[in-house]
Amino acid sequence: MDKKILFTGGAGFIGSHAVKYFVDKFPDYQIVNLDNLTYAGNLENLESVEGASNYTFVKGDICDEAMVRSLFETYHFDSVIHLAAESHVDRSIEDPLAFVHTNIIGTVNLLNICKEFWGDYLDDKLFYHISTDEVYGSLAEGDFFYETTAYDPKSPYSASKASSDHFVRAYSNTYKLPVVVSNCSNNYGPNQFPEKLIPLCIQNIIDHKPLPIYGKGENVRDWLFVHDHITAIDAIFHRGKKGETYNIGGFNEWKNLDLVVLLCKIMDRKLDRQPGTNEALITYVKDRAGHDIRYAIDSTKISETLDWQPSLQFEEGLEKTVDWYLENQEWLDHIKSGAYRINNSNFK
Ligand code: NAD
């Protein structure tokens, strides 16, 4: 069965892994990747699929109604896998409106255009909205986020994602648009922009720079290797029940400090440094405003109903991630120097 899928945000971290996976695994699917190449978008993430016959990249903003409409006229999409977002909590504290623009208005624009083009012919259609566990707020020790947990977003980022999730479900209820939503825990892996904790620390360890830890490093996050998020997206896209929500996570909780210490040890070994060398770089910095204490996902529903399981233990995933960054210094260098943005701007 062939499909015509509009991916949004496919030049970012998770989106580029998702696009490459779908282009390679489903050669009969026509895949269009719409991304406006913000600082987080990087065409170097997509080099392996650039020439694929079932793949097209389009530079554009998901908020641009006329442009998205013309894409639907050209490609007749039957599905949307929506990943485009502003995704960094610290940036949302600095500039909340950018998050309202892309995460809320952009999502509603896509929903409107799907509604308009799909009309009453909805059987083979799907709007798949990719969201985050951060919409559920902050957890006490011992508790978990379930699909039924009430939303309680605490940062401008999570508030904007929560709003977009509500709009997606409202379009399902009001207009019968076929939708599915997934809320995933923190991802890590290759190609993650080095503003997020793990790649930032990897880069700083390489450069012998301080490793900034918010507060006392006691905030707990539930980490999932990005490839495992993508296999979950595949399972939900193909076998998920329309109208449902799926939590995705690896039952893999780490305090930030413990995670960074583990990373330091792995990188002492990989870089042939004396044990403890990298740990000495740890530097405590003023805590993030309103910093959520703990996230932890219960992913029983997706495991039991769609037979999905994470494939990697955390230590294994972290080793793979470190290896990728060490073997792809040029990718990091292009971000540090800004060369990736010049490459991006060469795309017309
Ligand atoms: P990212 O910041 O790495 O990538 C976002 C991509 O969206 C970039 O390529 C950017 O250029 C593009 N984009 C931003 N604004 C756009 C706009 N207006 N129009 C078109 N493209 C636009 O983000 P990510 O970490 O890959 O996250 C992808 C999705 O997954 C997001 O929706 C995020 O909320 C969700 N998510 C992320 C995580 C995580 O740990 N990173 C966890 C759970 C869910």
Image (cartoon, grey):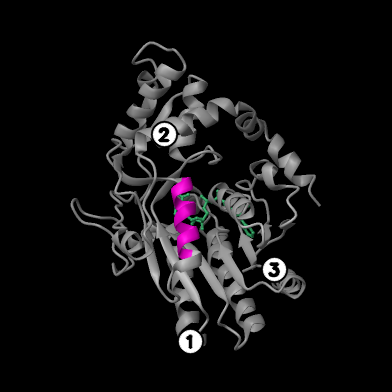
Residue 322 location (% of width, % of height): 47, 29
Residue 54 location (% of width, % of height): 71, 57
Residue at 57% of width from left, 83% of height from top? 122
Magenta stretch, residue numbers: 226-236
Would you identify the image quadrant in which residue 308 lies?
Answer: bottom left
Q: Amino acid at mark 1?
A: Thr
**Drawn side of residue 282 relative to residue 94, left or right:** left
Task: Tell me if residue 160 can be seen.
Answer: no
Please, what secondary structure does the residue beneath circle 1 have?
helix
Q: What residue is pinned by disc 2? A: 318
Checking the image for residue 174, the label placed there is: 1
Would you identify the image quadrant in which residue 34 lies?
Answer: bottom right
Q: Nearer the viewer, mark 3 or mark 2?
A: 2
Residue 7 location (% of width, % of height): 62, 61
From this view, report whether residue 122 is shown above or below residue 241.
below
Checking the image for residue 69, the label placed there is: none
The mark nearer the N terminus, 3 or 2, is 3
Residue at 57% of width from left, 70% of height from top? 105
Which of 341/234 is in front?
Answer: 234
Q: Quadrant of ligand 1?
A: bottom right
Mark 1 → mark 2, Cα distance in angstroms: 43 Å
C-beta proximity under 8 Å, tags 1 and 2: no
Which quadrant holds the N terminus? bottom right
Q: Amino acid at mark 2?
A: Leu
Say whether residue 235 is magenta. Answer: yes
From this view, report whether residue 297 is shown above or below residue 270.
below
Q: Amino acid at mark 3?
A: Asp
Checking the image for residue 64, the label placed there is: 3
